[in-house]
Amino acid sequence: MMNKQYYFTPRPLINPSARIFCFPYAGGTSSIYQDWASYFLPLNIEVVAISLPGRGARFADPFDVTIEDAISKVLSECRDALNSPFYLYGHSNGGLYAYEFACQLAKLGRLYNCKHLFIGAKSAPRKKNCRDPLHLLSDSEFRQALRDLGGTPEALLADQQLLDLLSPMLRNDFRLGHEYMLTEPEYCLNSLPATLIYGTEDKDVGHKEVLGWQELLPKAELHAIEGEHFFIHHQQAELINSLLARVTTKTKGIG
């Protein structure tokens, strides 16, 4: 796939057997999936990292208004790539994007090529799972909330000028996730295989919180990875291997 506004392909493949669309966590850029391409290359699977506005190469682009609107734009750009098998992975806030991606395709009758949905470190979208709205916190409270989440480098938190520059994007990401959780979507993807992944030491998203996804994804299984919320970085190899174990069985015969 050629790179476009809403997605970045770290290592484009001429004729991939399948693709995996990867959605970043709040504040994350497409670059967090840069290293994934080498893991999926032996299976001839192309990694497609979703690139959201307000960060990285798209720093000057206006923020998305809703997750639903963002996914509509993503689909408009990658529609042709959905004619072959694909997988979805979303981490934390990105899990909501991945689920909405699958929902919009299902409503269009185009989910048939989706082989598996992976959601990491994200509670089911229900009001009872909503944390306090981080986007409404004062500056000092917001800094501490970012520190507590554990995904923001301390150097950034200590740099007030840089934090002021990035805060509008971060706050908007948290707003999008919070408002999507409040909608309590009811679209049930009955036949879609899914895996719900959580960190064993994650204080906010544990077994109980991800279990709620089974109301929307009846075929979902749960998988635990040792670590905290951002196991996507600290346990990258283990996470990817857990995906590959499930992808491998589905790619046999594809191509």
Image (cartoon, rainbow, N blue to C red):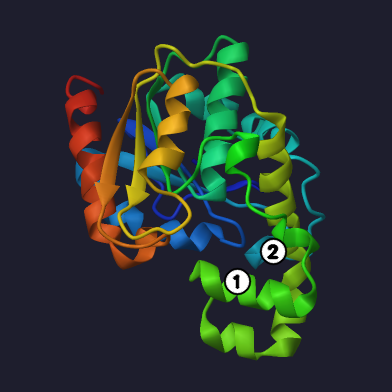
Residue 170, image x, y percentages = 69, 64
Residue 78, image x, y percentages = 58, 33
The residue that appears at 25% across and 33% down in the rendered structure is: 247
Q: Residues within 10 Å of mark 1 (few under 14, many from 20)?
A: some
Residue type, label 2: Leu
Residue 92 in view here: yes
Local secondary structure at mark 1: helix
Local secondary structure at mark 2: helix
The residue that appears at 37% across and 65% down in the rendered structure is: 233
First in sequence, mark 2 or 1: give its number.
1
Residue 91, image x, y percentages = 47, 49
Residue at image mark 2: 170
Front disc: 2 or 1: 1
The residue that appears at 49% across and 62% down in the rendered structure is: 31
Which mark, residue 146? Answer: 1
Which mark, residue 66? Answer: none
- Who is closer to the viewer here, 68 or 51? 68
- Who is closer to the viewer here, 126 or 38? 126
Residue type, label 1: Leu
Looking at the image, residue 16 lies above or below residue 139:
above
Looking at the image, residue 253 lies above or below residue 125:
above
Q: CA distance from mark 2 to mark 1?
A: 10 Å
**Residue 183 placement, left or right of 222:** right
Quadrant that contains the C terminus: top left
**Residue 163 placement, left or right of 224:** right
Residue 15 in view here: no
Looking at the image, residue 250 lies above or below residue 156:
above
Looking at the image, residue 169 lies above or below residue 74:
below
The residue that appears at 25% across and 58% down in the rendered structure is: 226
* Tag 2 near tag 1, CB within 8 Å: yes
The answer to which image quadrant residue 161 occupies is bottom right
Q: Given the current orientation, which residue lies at the most extreme top position?
A: 109
